[in-house]
Image (tube, rainbow, N blue to C red):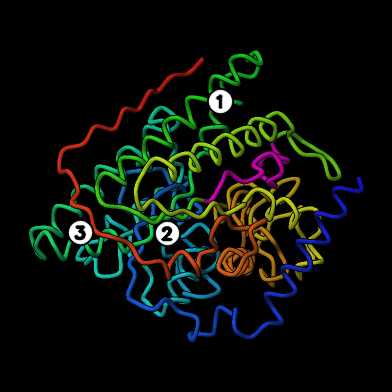
């Protein structure tokens, strides 16, 4: 209890500092990177800016209908929230347009490309209907080849090496495992974590071999505490689904160690691990400290915690989404994403390590010619 209170107090002080110190405000462009830096974005619905709009999916898989997008864009864009995402706020902070989804017609790659897909996992089997991490890597290879053809080897490699590669993935894989293997032994759980971390590490190495040098990796969030999970399990009070939380904590610890090892093996490799789990968990448990009135119920949906089927009748919509941590049962509101982005941009080492995002964007990188033909060994092992 004492350790939990100390952790909460530290996070609260970090958050308040981000609001009070002018030079670290997301609106302060004086802290933008020293040079133009593109973003290449991979992952799931936390980062998806609309790729799922262009896939033949059922409506429950998409976010291209009202009231998604109502607060900022005033129309649905395919983002799984009422406005902007973490990556949108980061783009604003470096004074660049929002990074477009890969499947959007007519895009260019001047500021990067967003490959993320809502529902995606590290393993293709997690959800074959969406764009898995391996498929996102293949799409990136297409972009890298196009850059080489249009810009030439030297300029393409310069842009690829200076870019920041942001990834948020893994939560859907743990949902898949817990749902399909409810009676898994401890050994089977540990093997799943090991395989998932191994595949994620292989993905990072593949990007490195293609020219990437700077990586921003959100660890897996506290999925067992989300309103949708709590509603499906009919959990009361502050209860969370503990099974997935324990696996995810092991995953985050192992992934952090694996990425740190890559730094010692790969020349020029730089990274930031962003502690999505700890920050979001703290926001759920102490919403008022972050300016929210509600963290158990979502703004849009129906059911016990208003956490199912946002935008699909019957559903209810709150009057002021900024008072809620969650917009639907799975995803934070724009206000929640703004706070997360601010903390990751300016965070202390307990929040973003060994660099925060501002520092990572400022780092120089040495171009290295990428290889056109790479293997991406997705193990796809399920107990």
Residue at 56%, 21% in the rendered image = 180
Judge depth for marks 3 and 2 and give the one in front. 3
- Choose the circle earlier in sequence order: 1 or 3: 3
Q: Nearer the viewer, residue 110 or 31?
A: 31
Q: Is residue 133 left or right of residue 109?
A: right
* Stretch of the chain drawn in magenta: 218-232
Packing grade of label 2 (10 A; few <14, some 14-19, many >=20) is many
* Predominant SS along the magenta part: helix
Give the structural element (helix, strand or loop) at label 1.
helix
For mark 3, what is the residue? 157
Which residue reaches farthest right?
2
As drawn, the label of residue 177 is: 1
Give the structural element (helix, strand or loop) at label 2.
loop
The quadrant where residue 101 appears: bottom left
- Choose the circle earlier in sequence order: 2 or 1: 2
Packing grade of label 3 (10 A; few <14, some 14-19, many >=20) is many
């Amino acid at each position: 209890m004492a350790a939990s209170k100390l952790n909460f107090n530290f996070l609260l002080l970090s958050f308040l500092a981000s609001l009070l110190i002018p030079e670290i405000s997301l609106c302060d462009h004086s802290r933008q990177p020293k040079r133009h830096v593109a973003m290449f974005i991979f992952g799931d619905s936390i980062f998806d800016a609309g790729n799922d709009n262009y896939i033949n999916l059922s409506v429950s898989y998409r976010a291209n209908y009202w009231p998604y997008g109502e607060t900022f864009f005033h129309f649905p864009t395919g983002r799984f929230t009422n406005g902007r995402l973490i990556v949108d706020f980061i783009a604003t902070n470096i004074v660049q347009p929002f990074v477009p989804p890969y499947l959007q017609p007519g895009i260019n790659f001047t500021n990067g490309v967003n490959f993320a897909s809502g529902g995606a996992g590290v393993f293709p089997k997690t959800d074959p209907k969406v764009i898995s991490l391996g498929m996102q890597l293949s799409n990136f290879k297409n972009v890298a080849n196009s850059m080489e053809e249009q810009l030439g080897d030297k300029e393409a490699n310069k842009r690829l090496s200076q870019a920041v590669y942001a990834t948020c993935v893994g939560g859907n894989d743990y949902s898949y495992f817990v749902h399909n293997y409810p009676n898994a032994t401890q050994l089977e759980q540990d093997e799943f974590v090991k395989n998932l971390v191994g595949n994620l590490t292989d993905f990072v190495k593949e990007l490195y071999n293609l020219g990437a040098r700077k990586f921003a990796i959100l660890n897996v969030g506290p999925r067992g505490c989300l309103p949708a999970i709590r509603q499906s399990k009919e959990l009361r009070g502050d209860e969370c689904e503990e099974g997935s939380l324990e696996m995810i904590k092991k995953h985050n610890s192992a992934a952090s160690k694996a990425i740190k090892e890559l730094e010692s093996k790969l020349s020029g490799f730089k990274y930031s691990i962003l502690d999505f789990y700890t920050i979001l968990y703290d926001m759920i448990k102490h919403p008022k400290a972050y300016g929210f009135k509600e963290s158990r119920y979502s703004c849009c949906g129906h059911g016990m915690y208003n956490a199912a089927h946002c935008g699909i009748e019957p559903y209810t919509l709150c009057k002021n989404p900024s008072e809620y941590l969650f917009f639907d049962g799975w995803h934070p509101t724009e206000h929640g994403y703004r706070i997360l982005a601010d903390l990751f941009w300016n965070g202390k080492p307990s929040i973003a390590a060994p660099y925060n995002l501002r520092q990572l964007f400022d780092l120089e990188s040495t171009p290295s010619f990428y290889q056109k033909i790479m293997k991406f060994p997705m193990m796809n092992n399920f107990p």
